[in-house]
Image (cartoon, rainbow, N blue to C red):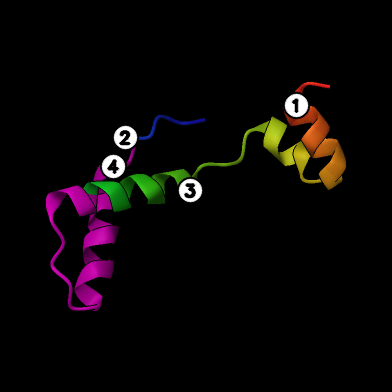
Amino acid sequence: MRHATEHQQDFTELARHAFADRGYVPTDAWLKAAAKGLARLADELPESLESAQTLSFDDMLKRCAGV
């Protein structure tokens, strides 16, 4: 997984434009949170989460419970 701040400026600008398109002037905290969320969306899922998508719900519960 790549470091969350690797492209922080790009994601901050993207968030700023998205807010501006909707006529909203966000605070620095909102911009930072939005940029962090965009960075997480851009990252690939860890292998353990990708393989979990093929598990049934019951198997997922057992895995989380450590059974």
Q: Helix, strand, or loop for circle 4?
A: helix
Residue situated in front as seen by the camera: 28 or 56: 56
Q: Disc 2 to disc 3, how far (Cα)? A: 12 Å
The quarter of the picture where residue 44 lies is top right
Q: Amino acid type of disc 1?
A: Ala
The residue at 78%/36% (across/down) is: 61
Q: Are marks 4 and 2 in contact (CB under 8 Å)?
A: yes
Q: Are marks 2 and 3 in contact (CB under 8 Å)?
A: no
Q: Amino acid type of disc 4?
A: Gln
Q: Is tag 2's residue or tag 3's residue first in the polypeptide sequence?
A: 2
Residue annotated with mark 2: 5
- Magenta segment range? 5-31
Of badges 4 and 1, nearer the viewer stands: 1
Q: Helix, strand, or loop for circle 3?
A: helix
Is residue 24 placed above or below 15 in the rendered structure? below
Q: Disc 4 to disc 2, how far (Cα)? A: 5 Å
Residue annotated with mark 3: 42
Of badges 2 and 1, nearer the viewer stands: 1
The residue at 86%/37% (across/down) is: 59
Find residue 8 and name its label: 4
21 is within the stretch colored magenta: yes
Is residue 65 placed above or below 60 in the rendered structure? above
Kindly report the secondary structure that dominates the magenta region of the rendered protein: helix
